[in-house]
Image (cartoon, rainbow, N blue to C red):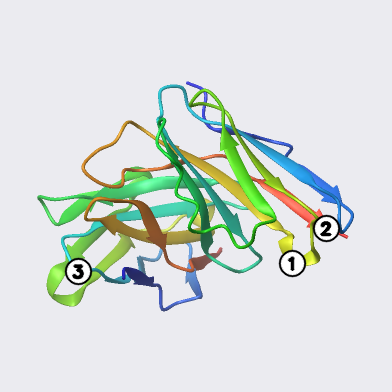
Amino acid sequence: AQSVTQPDIHITVSEGASLELRCNYSYGATPYLFWYVQSPGQGLQLLLKYFSGDTLVQGIKGFEAEFKRSQSSFNLRKPSVHWSDAAEYFCAVGGGGSYIPTFGRGTSLIVHP
Amino acid sequence: GAGVSQSPSNKVTEKGKDVELRCDPISGHTALYWYRQSLGQGLEFLIYFQGNSAPDKSGLPSDRFSAERTGGSVSTLTIQRTQQEDSAVYLCASSPPPAPSVSEQYFGPGTRLTVT
């Protein structure tokens, strides 16, 4: 069965600092990986996705993520955080002919001025 | 273009009453999902529709929950005899025509259901 672990429930950073949100997955085949962001009172918005190819993927809003098969990880990074990045971030995994992704429990990002 | 819309945005109901939640997916998207998000929790999958195929209902928590999708477009999630534990945000998402596997999802803003 596929699963996703986001080890950090909350992350607090200062505005302008770099950010890395962790995501570890369990999946038997080549995974399809996603990062979504949810602002308060909103639905989820896709930040980036990995299906195949280059393991470093670029997304919207200056985010990037790196797929590391050996570590079963897909960590999200941003070099300089803005106050507007404060939100909930979800990692998701799918693939192998399944159309139902599995989501992690999310990481809440708090940005201090 | 228009995104996924959901109505109502908020719904307060008394325990034991039935509720209907509506989702309008993005035009041309053949896949539609319903999720439940409880406070501080991740997304709990409820049901998946793909075109005219039989839906995957494996995530529905009880027989009080049902959903239908008419004409391959609009979907309605119905909760009968609501309980307080049904209080949550119900999210709908749609995806483009099928890729080899799961594709990116486009989410609506959700319906916040409160059962008193």
Residue, far left? A53
Report the residue marked by disc 1. Answer: B85
Q: Residue at x 51, y 26 (%)?
A: B73
Q: Are marks 3 and 1 on the same chain?
A: no
Out of B11 and A65, give the one closest to the viewer.
B11
Image side of residue B98 versus residue B40, left or right: left
**Up/down of B42 relative to A10, above or below:** above
Image side of residue B38 versus residue A96, left or right: right
Q: Which mark is residue B115?
A: 2
In the rendering, at what x and y percent does residue B45 appear? Answer: 50, 57
- Mark 2 and mark 1 lie on one chain; the one further toward the N terminus is 1
Report the residue marked by disc 3. Answer: A28
What chain is tagged by disc 3?
A
Q: Amino acid at mark 2?
A: Val
In the rendering, at what x and y percent does residue A11 appear? Answer: 48, 73
Callout 1: SS: helix
Q: Quadrant of the C terminus of chain B?
A: bottom right
In the rendering, at what x and y percent does residue B8 appear? Answer: 74, 37
Callout 2: SS: strand
